Amino acid sequence: MAVSQDDKSLLALYRVPGTKEKGFTLIIQKYQERLYWHIRRMVMDHDDANDVLQNVFIKVWKNLENFREDAQLYTWLYKIATNESLTFLEQQKRKTSVSLSEVENGLSNKLRADPQFDPNKLEWKLQRAILSLPDKQRIVFNLRYYDEMPYEEMSKVLDTSEGALKASYHHAVKKIEEYIRNG
């Protein structure tokens, strides 16, 4: 199947004028689901995640010409998705001119509105615990726990040292454990 092509082949397809759109389509097919779930875990709402994902791919389309392959394509895409998600959350805060805790309550309400929501199930407690984390810890936790991203890759995505990321992850895990124990 063409979707499993390696990134170098996909980028080569993209860089040829006659196959540019096909190369881009294959890149989208290869990464859209992983990026969607990365974004969804940050913004919580399906429609918001789709909007952010669309913005990510618009940005990718505009900037892929300049991608120098210093990093892996996957890392570059995650960085764009992370930044777009953070921008979206910031805009939500500004748009409603509310405090961060109110935005977190809004995210928590979106979680509770899910028809499958059951506050007694561990997976929902985990989601609420993750939502209680500060943005950076939440991103680090999600990248490590759900995406199993190595610290080295995460360091490139978030422009942060591996040591700081390990500390953030450690603090996030402790807070989540405490939340689940006491929540």
Image (cartoon, rainbow, N blue to C red):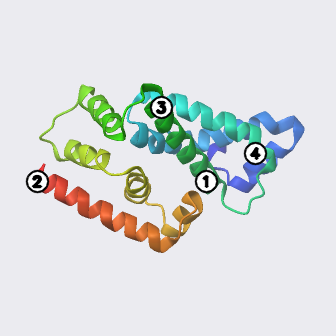
Viewer can see residue 47: no
Tell me which amino acid carries mark 4: Leu
Asked if the residue at tag 3 contacts the one at tag 4, i.e. Cβ–Cβ closer than 8 Å, the answer is: no
Image quadrant in which you'd find residue 52: top right
Above or below, comparing residue 8 to residue 95 in the picture: below
Above or below, comparing residue 47 to residue 119 in the picture: above
Q: Considering depth in this image, is 146 or 41 the residue closer to the camera? A: 41
Residue where numbered disc 1 is placed: 74
Q: Which mark is residue 94?
A: 3
User: SS at mark 2?
Assistant: helix
Q: Nearer the viewer's eye, disc 4 or disc 3? A: 3
Residue where numbered disc 4 is placed: 64
Q: Nearer the viewer's eye, disc 1 or disc 2? A: 2
Above or below, comparing residue 79 to residue 28 in the picture: below
Taking the spot 40% from the left edge, 53% from the top edge, the residue there is: 142
Q: Earlier in the sequence, mark 1 or mark 2?
A: 1
> Residue 179: x percent and y percent?
18, 53
Image quadrant in which you'd find residue 178: bottom left
Taking the spot 24% from the left edge, 25% from the top edge, the residue there is: 115
Q: Earlier in the sequence, mark 4 or mark 3?
A: 4
Tell me which amino acid carries mark 1: Tyr
Local packing at callout 1 (Cα closer than 10 Å; few below 14, some 14-19, many 20+) is some
Tell me which amino acid carries mark 2: Asn
Q: CA distance from mark 2 to mark 4?
A: 46 Å
Q: Is residue 78 left or right of residue 17?
A: left
Q: CA distance from mark 1 to mark 3?
A: 30 Å
